[in-house]
Image (cartoon, rainbow, N blue to C red):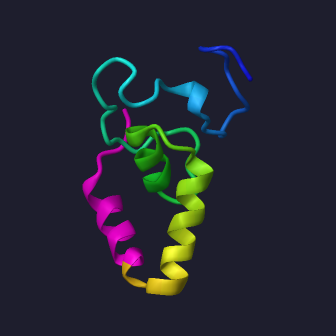
């Protein structure tokens, strides 16, 4: 396991890159990161916000789009509403 603060490969978002939600008593802001995006950064934003693994969020999002369809509209809505990291 990489030590805290260690840099990972460019474009790869990992848990070690940001503190987990609740470690400092507050959750991270819901912001689409510049690094680690695949399409718009919505899955990375949700994963960082709640301290989840970004790969798990992406897999769940793809499964929800394939099986339920409604989540595609939610993804687009979040893409429009969640601010991008500066």
Q: Quadrant of residue 8?
A: top right
Residue at 60% in and 63% down: 59
Residue at 46% in and 28% down: 20
**Residue 39 vertical position relative to residue 86 in the rendered view, above or below:** below
The percent coordinates of residue 37 (x first, y second) are 55, 49
Q: Quadrant of residue 6?
A: top right
> What type of secondary structure mainly makes up the magenta span?
helix
Q: Quadrant of the N terminus?
A: top right
**Residue 42 vertical position relative to residue 59 in the rendered view, above or below:** above
Q: Is residue 67 left or right of residue 42?
A: right
Q: Is residue 28 left or right of residue 2?
A: left
Front one among 71 and 36? 71
Say whether residue 78 is magenta. yes
Q: Is residue 27 left or right of residue 9?
A: left
Magenta residue span? 71-86
**Residue 77 vertical position relative to residue 7 in the rendered view, above or below:** below
Q: Is residue 25 left or right of residue 52?
A: left
Residue at 44% in and 85% down: 68
In this rendering, the count of numbered labels is 0
The percent coordinates of residue 26 (x first, y second) are 28, 25
Front one among 4 and 84? 4
Front one among 67 and 40? 67
The percent coordinates of residue 3 (x first, y second) are 68, 14
Residue at 39% in and 75% down: 71
Q: Quadrant of the C terminus?
A: top left
The percent coordinates of residue 52 (x first, y second) are 50, 43
**Residue 70 vertical position relative to residue 49 in the rendered view, above or below:** below
């Amino acid at each position: 396991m990489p030590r805290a603060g260690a840099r990972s490969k460019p474009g790869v978002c990992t848990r070690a890159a940001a503190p987990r939600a609740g470690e400092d008593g507050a959750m991270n802001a819901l912001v689409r990161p510049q690094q680690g995006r695949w399409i718009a950064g919505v899955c990375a934003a949700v994963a960082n916000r709640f301290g989840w693994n970004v790969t798990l969020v992406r897999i769940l999002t793809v499964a929800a789009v394939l099986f339920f369809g409604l989540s595609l509209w939610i993804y687009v809505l979040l893409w429009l509403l969640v601010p991008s990291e500066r």
